[in-house]
Amino acid sequence: MNPCEQPLHVLHQMRTTGEISTEEIAKSVLARIQQAEPKLHAYLAMTDEKTVLENARKADKKRTSGEVVHPLEGMPITLKDIFCTQGMETTCGSKMLKGFVPPYDATVVEKLKHQGLNLTGKTNMDEFAMGSSTENSAYGPTKNPWDTSRVPGGSSGGTAAAVAAGMALAGLGTDTGGSIRQPASFTSLVGLKPTYGRVSRYGMIAFASSLDQGGVLTRDAEDAALLLGAIAGHDPRDSTSADRPVPDYTQALQGDLKGVRLGLVKQFQGAGLDKEVEDHFQANLNELQGLGAEVVEVSLPALEYALAVYYILAPSEASSNLGRFDGIRYGLRSKHAEDLSQVYQKSREEGFGPEVKRRIMLGTFALSAGYYDAYYNKALNVRRMLSADFNRAFQQVSMIVCPTSPVPPFKLGERLSDPLQMYLVDSYTLPVNLAGLPGMSIPGGFTKGGLPLGLQFIAPAFQEEKLLQAAHGFQQVTDYHLRRPVM
């Protein structure tokens, strides 16, 4: 048994009974980082090895003295480089923020530190979370541990690759249109995007403020329940944070799916769905029905407009949010500017990559005079229609089930020259963000070539327990979550 390839909850149980120490766990993860990081490029910044081992020893000392040790305490965990970490560089995958060392921690980082966070480092990502492949990072792409010629998904691809490869036991990502769930699908992990407002966005660098949500990437549903419970909760520093009690998510990890009605969305079936993805999805539905679930068809009429709506609203919010990075207030300042106008122009030209520039221009156009009502306001109206469609569907079913991605992991560079083909990869995930709902991708099988596939569950707002129940039930009859890439 290699500790770095085991789930958190299994290792915590083992250290509780004295079968293994936290230090041994940390050494296993550090050894895997040395072995795999040069091949994968999952990290942008690393914590010193001595610090990681020291944090692990603190947890061991606490346990041997008879104190209660939290399941996450001392366990090597990683963070997407979008979360502010006090005293540690946070770049958001961009040259614009190179050298930025925050003077404070994001709320989720604070919460994890209270649980004894042992941070391995900050992981690679698409610049400002804009991408579906982690190829848009200013610091080079991350590779998929299952096949290094392919992408790990994005924008949280660095976290996904690190956890899948055993270079961290679990990690945090963010999800604006699928950026947790799609990398989870591409690397055979569990990726849970909570309800909008369930996890604080304070200290999380903004892309699209009405869509962004922090969440977790783990090996299985048990670990997802533990990590979500540690970071969820109200935060007065985030005006969009929901003031609702946080349940014990681990209590959802029981029972079968008898009496659970799963919705099969009519509009998700058809063109663009890879044949192997479709075949595995049908097999997964059979497994779920074997667990007692009933599958019924539901309709989301506004779904056909979701992709267009997303690529009006998200770039519009990005255009606004990224306006602060101008070489004066925040971010890189060009050394080649000769006057104030050139400071703005050259700083943004040098600091932002092609995809970020593309989305800023799209958003600025949609918000401009003469187009605001035609594009932005109309998109808001359709967004409300989509939310209403989901609400009607949830009057008939407990959850919605669908593939996470219409395609398996694609090759590096395959879609970079065609932005539309890249955007279509998120067609099954971004409607969840538009409606502010919780969504979860779990390992759903492998192609004949050994590439991971994901199965997605979508639940009503603040009902993450339903997602965890479904994932846990599915884990009882499949072994996809137990398989590991050969490193």
Image (cartoon, rainbow, N blue to C red):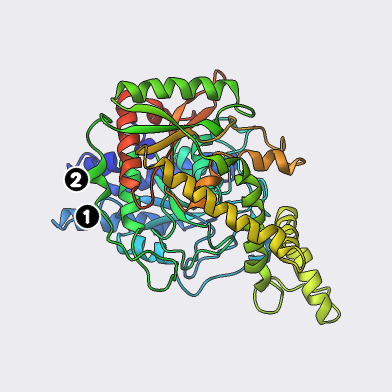
| Residue 50 falls in image quadrant | bottom left
Residue 145 pos. (x, y %): 54, 35
138 relative position to 75: left or right: right
Q: Residues within 10 Å of mark 1 (few under 14, many from 20)?
A: some
Please state which amino acid type lies under the numbered disc 2: Thr
Who is closer to the viewer here, 384 or 127?
Answer: 384
Spatial CA span between label 1 and label 2 = 9 Å
Vertical order, 172 against 445 (above or below): below
Q: Quadrant of residue 189?
A: top left
In the structure shown, which secondary structural element does the residue marked by tag 2 occupy? helix
Q: Which residue, as the protein is rendered here, is positioned at the far right?
A: 338
Dot placed on the residue nearer the N-terminal end, 1 or 2: 2
> The N terminus appears in which quarter of the rendering?
top left
421 or 102, nearer to the observer: 421
Q: Secondary structure at mark 1?
A: loop
- Judging by the rendered image, the residue that carries numbered circle 1 is 69
Relative to 45, is 481 on the left or the right?
Answer: left
Question: Can residue 16 be seen at all in this image of the molecule?
Answer: yes
* Residue shown at the point (22%, 57%) measured from the top left: 61
**Are the residues flagged by discs 1 and 2 in contact, CB closer than 8 Å?**
yes
Rendering coords of residue 55 (x, y %): 34, 58
Residue in the picture at 46% in, 58% down: 48
Disc 2 target residue: 16
Badge 2: residue crowd in 10 Å (few <14, some 14–19, many ≥20): some
The circle on residue 257 is: none
Residue 178 visible (yes or no): no
Q: Nearer the viewer, residue 380 or 166?
A: 380
Badge 1 amino acid: Val
Q: Residue furthest left?
A: 66
